[in-house]
Image (tube, helix red, strand yellow):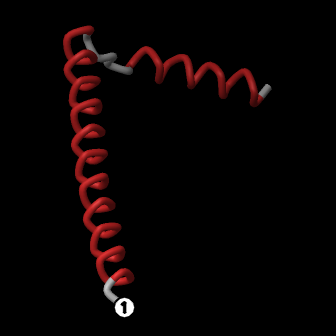
Amino acid sequence: MKLFKFFGSVNKEMKLVVWPTFKENRRDTWIVIATSLMYAIFFSLVDWGLVTLLQTFVMSK
């Protein structure tokens, strides 16, 4: 019977959840996409810089 009690309490808690609106969800999605793109660009530039630096260092010997 503990299982029924558990699912009953889960049901009560789910009724208390405030779900985001479509507008909030869309805004948050764009924030995640923009942040991901900024990190991708940043790490690509750092990678390119390190590769260039290492190639210059290795080629100079």
Q: Quadrant of the N terminus?
A: top right
Q: Quadrant for residue 49, please give it.
A: bottom left
Q: Position of residue 18 (x, y in %)?
A: 32, 18
56 lies above or below 6: below
* Front residue of 24 and 30: 30
Task: In the displayed orientation, state which residue is furthest to the bottom.
Answer: 61
Q: Which residue is mark 1?
A: 61
Q: Quadrant for residue 43, please give it.
A: bottom left
Assign a secondary structure to mark 1.
loop
30 lies above or below 58: above
* Front residue of 31 and 34: 34
- What amino acid type is highlighted by mark number 1? Lys
Task: In the displayed orientation, state which residue is furthest to the top.
Answer: 22
Q: Quadrant for residue 26, please give it.
A: top left
**Residue drawn at the location 37% of the way across and 91% of the way down:** 61
Q: Position of residue 9 (x, y in %)?
A: 57, 25
33 lies above or below 4: below
